[in-house]
Image (cartoon, helix red, strand yellow):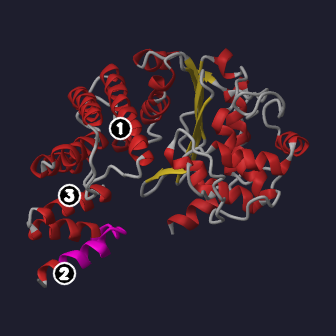
Amino acid sequence: MTKLFLSLTALITCLPILCTAAEDKLVSRPKWKAVFTEFEAEGTMVVVDERANSRGSFVYDRKRAATRFSPASTFKIPHAMFAIDAGVVKDEFQVIPWDGKKRFYEPWNQDQTLRSSMRHSVVWVYQTFEQAIGQDGERAYMEKINYGNADPTGKAPFWVEGNLRISAVEQIEFLQKLHRNQLPLSMNAQRLVKDVMINEAGRDWILRAKTGWSGSIGWWVGWVEHPTGAVFFALNIDTPKRMDDLFKREAIVRKILQSLDALPKQVAADVSNKVSKKQAGEAFREYRAGVKIITKIQADLMQRGLVAEPMVEIEMLPEQVLEYKKARKHWLRSVALNPHFPDVYVFLANSHWEIENDLVKTIDYYTKALEIDPDYDDVLSARAQVYLLLKQTDAAEKDLLRLEALDSEHAEPLREEITKLRGK
């Protein structure tokens, strides 16, 4: 019923006053300045609420909302549709072969699908789309859907470094047409791209969105579907601190949407009242600093034909062990600032497993991660493996039952391993 309802909702034609993000329909929301100030951010946000009990259409910083900026990776939304419409890619399951070039972000270094390329914002995939469609084709498609200034020229990739520009108001107008399947593109292209845009979902809502970052401007655009209509949003902010500013995109949007009851409180950003926003930012920077260190260690080990991971016995060089311990200090500072981020505990657990083989501390940190996210199946599987090493088969079996309840891919191999051990 939910899927059927949501598909019908997308086809409903709403009243004209709610169907446009035109600037004269937007009511200024100067109070939102407090949210931007809280996160030490400069930017704009546009919200158009089309629910039956609509709160209205709002804007913070009207002048900036009408100013065009590079769309960065938010352009992947229309770009994916162009590729489907032009026959460059068939559907969300088609494998797009990796070109073999190693890039800084590991998820990019593998074959992709439309879904994975959207989730991980894989630039090289969309560059292959650009080559196949051609500059004239890109311009024609953008003019056809009235996307920003429709200019595919300039430094590559043109949607990040080049001359393409779009405003937050224009982003909303484009997203509204996509939501209602009203773009002059194939219905299949619009439906497929909306599917791969899903970020989160609840019993009666779906969040479809895409981030973007040009290096100086950060975006988050999309909409939340509800039974009585959608709530569209487009935010852009300056990012003078570069990656350290990126978490602010979602944090600001989520807080504002939550204030409008457009997102339920339980999915508010992790940077909530549990810790201050300043602490959350500092914690994220410490986490990233540790990840950068371990990424370099992993790269060095790969050059030696080794892989640093639990269950694989390797010999790290003394200087690598010291670096790994430096990474752990960053993660300890991160959890001290924000104890509500499960991935940091996972890194801490792995460090105790890989450096000292301290399985008790490893379990302690995995358990802390699971206290925050009980359905984290990778961690349940890892903790079960440690329990088995400690010959605590009953404890491992409890994690197995949880994995089976989650229908996790980790359940079957773990079941086989436990059965094998019990048979000995």
Residue that appears at 49% across and 20% down? 32
Question: What residue did someone put label 2 on?
Answer: 419
Crowd tier of the residue under label 2, counting other residues whose Cα lies within 10 Å: few below 14, some 14–19, many 20 or above: few
Farthest bottom residue in view: 423
Tell me the mark number nearer the camera, choosing from 1 and 2: 1
Numbered-mark total: 3
Near-viewer residue (335 or 124): 124
Question: Residue 220, percent across and down?
Answer: 56, 34
In x, y percent, where is residue 303? 45, 46
- How far apart marks 1 and 2 lie (CA) works out to 35 Å
* Nearer-the-camera pick, 37 or 420: 420
Determine whether the residue tagged by mark 3 lies in a helix, strand or loop: helix
Q: Earlier in the sequence, mark 3 or mark 1?
A: 1
Is residue 271 a member of the stretch shown in magenta? no
Residue 10 in sight in this render: yes
Residue at which label 3 appears: 383
Q: Which mark is residue 369?
A: none
Q: Which stretch did the figure color magenta? A: 404-420
Q: Amino acid at mark 2?
A: Thr
Disc 1 is placed on an element classified as: helix
Q: Residue at x 79, y 26 (%)?
A: 163
Q: Eyeballing the image, is 100 above or below 217?
A: below
Number of residues whose C-alpha sits closer than 10 Å to that of mark 3, classed few (under 14), some (14–19) or many (20 or more):
many
Horizontally, is 291 left or right of 130 in the view? Answer: left
Q: Residue at x 71, y 24 (%)?
A: 23
217 on left or right of 342? right
User: Label 1, on which residue?
Assistant: 294
Q: Nearer the viewer, residue 37 or 329?
A: 329
